[in-house]
Image (cartoon, rainbow, N blue to C red):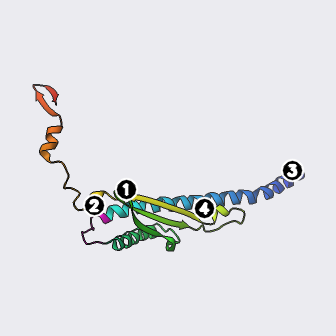
Amino acid sequence: MKKLKSQQITEFMLAAPLLIIFFAVLTEFAFALNANLVFTNAIKSSVIAYISTISSDTNKTEMENAIKDYVKSDMQKNKIPNLSSLNVSLINVGDNPAVIGNYTYKPGFTFAFLPALKNINMSAITLFPITAIDFTGYENAISTEELNSIQPQIVQEGGDVVVEP
């Protein structure tokens, strides 16, 4: 009986470091995933929040700085570390302006045999609605009269609803 108990303790002592490393890597992955989700959401919400403040004399640098400040404050609220690596820039994707953000997550602990956990680079991109920046965006919009001529007319005859083109 004593031999069996000492065998169990020995096996546990051999397996314990592997279990600790496994749970440490799993925990660090969860923190990195949380940072990525918060970062991506912060980029998207910064665009939504910033659209209403754009004016015709706003330049690219002002927009980038305002969006970066918004993203940084949102990430600070969620206690995401290493915000000095945060970078935000405005680019054009075809005819659409977009915000692209880059962030490097540095894990709280690393292992020499897991170089993939040294730095985790994250990127997020969000398109601006073209009408938010192009102040002439509504010039080519369809008028109400044209829209009504295209939409089918719904007519109620007695108790029946009839769709007429």
Q: Is residue 145 left or right of residue 125?
A: left
Mark number displayed over residue 4: 3
The alpha-carbon separation of the residues under discs 1 and 4 comes to 37 Å
Q: Label 4: which residue?
A: 28
Please determine whether, in this image, residue 58 is positioned above or below residue 15. Answer: below
**Mark 4 Cα within 10 Å, few/some/many (few <14, many 20+)?**
some
Q: Amino acid at mark 4?
A: Glu
Residue sitting at 82 percent across and 54 percent down? 11
Q: Quadrant of the C terminus?
A: top left
Q: Label 1: which residue?
A: 94
Please determine whether, in this image, residue 38 is positioned above or below residue 4. Answer: below
The alpha-carbon separation of the residues under discs 2 and 3 comes to 73 Å
Q: Amino acid at mark 1?
A: Gly
Mark nearer the viewer, 1 or 2: 1
**Mark 2 Cα within 10 Å, few/some/many (few <14, many 20+)?**
some
Instruction: Looking at the picture, tell me which residue is in the foreground, 15 or 51.
Output: 51
Find out whether the residues at labels 1 and 2 contact each other: C-beta distance under 8 Å: no
**Mark 3 Cα within 10 Å, few/some/many (few <14, many 20+)?**
few
Range drawn in magenta: 50-58
Would you identify the image quadrant in which residue 164 lies? top left
Instruction: Looking at the picture, tell me which residue is in the foreground, 56 or 106.
Output: 56
Q: Report the residue that reaches farthest toward the left.
A: 158
Instruction: Looking at the picture, tell me which residue is in the foreground, 72 or 150.
Output: 150
